[in-house]
Image (tube, rainbow, N blue to C red):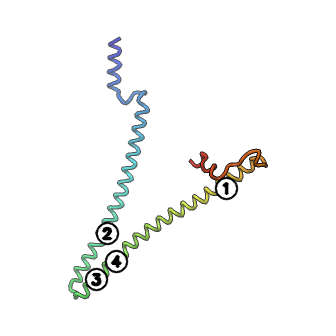
Amino acid sequence: MKAVEQKLSDYKAKNAGRLPDELQTNITQMNALDQRSSSLSEAATRNAERRMMLESELRARKDRLAALKKNNYQSAAGGDRISDLISKSAITNRRSRHERSLYRRLSRLQAARDRLVVLKKQRDDAFKNAAKNEPTTVAESPSLGENEWKRSSRWK
């Protein structure tokens, strides 16, 4: 009996993680690793996009510096004009990024409004269908009020 138990414990130790009774644990671990892999992949994509944006900005600044060095012979007034143009360019660039951000927010807002219109239509249709299936008098069967309908399982 002890020899059989010893063989069984040796077999379990040798095949740890591959036995059928550990299947659910293995599946849970695989799902967790898959989610972690997905989040790391998304982070890598975001980092690559950020790196490309920073490299582009660096190239633009290097070009601007080269242009300033090339035009260094200009008078002080001309240099002031260049620095003024550079600052205006930077302000315009910041405004442009801000406006792009606002545009993205607007498009998400419009999509949410569209979904809201569809949901309201579905809600109204459900009210109409519920009214058709109910008895004709209110005393026989009370109808769902709007607040009761929202608390129902369809809104959870």
Q: Are marks 2 and 4 in contact (CB under 8 Å)?
A: no
Q: Are marks 3 and 2 in contact (CB under 8 Å)?
A: no
The residue pinned by badge 4 equals 89
Q: Where is residue 134 in the image (x, y as percent from the top left)?
A: 75, 47
Q: Residue 60 carries which label?
A: none
Three-letter residue code for mark 1: Asp
Q: Distance between the residues labelled 4 and 3?
A: 10 Å
Where is 152 relative to 7, above or below? below
Per the image, label 2 sits on a secondary structure element best described as: helix
Q: Distance between the residues labelled 4 and 1?
A: 52 Å
Q: Which of 43 and 63 is in front in this view?
A: 43
The residue pinned by badge 2 equals 57
Q: Distance between the residues labelled 1 and 3?
A: 62 Å
Q: Residue 124 carries which label?
A: 1
Please state which of the two labelled residues, at mark 2 or mark 4, is closer to the viewer: 4
Q: Do the residues labelled 4 and 3 touch (CB within 8 Å)?
A: no
Counting residues from the start of the chain, the first of labels 4 and 3 encountered is 3
Q: Distance between the residues labelled 1 and 2?
A: 51 Å
Counting residues from the start of the chain, the first of labels 2 and 4 encountered is 2
Three-letter residue code for mark 2: Glu
Please state which of the two labelled residues, at mark 3 or mark 2, is closer to the viewer: 3
Q: How far apart are marks 3 and 2 (CA)?
A: 19 Å
In the image, what residue occupies the spot 69% across and 52% down? 127
Counting residues from the start of the chain, the first of labels 1 and 2 encountered is 2
The residue pinned by badge 3 equals 82
Three-letter residue code for mark 3: Ile
Q: Nearer the viewer, residue 95 or 123?
A: 123
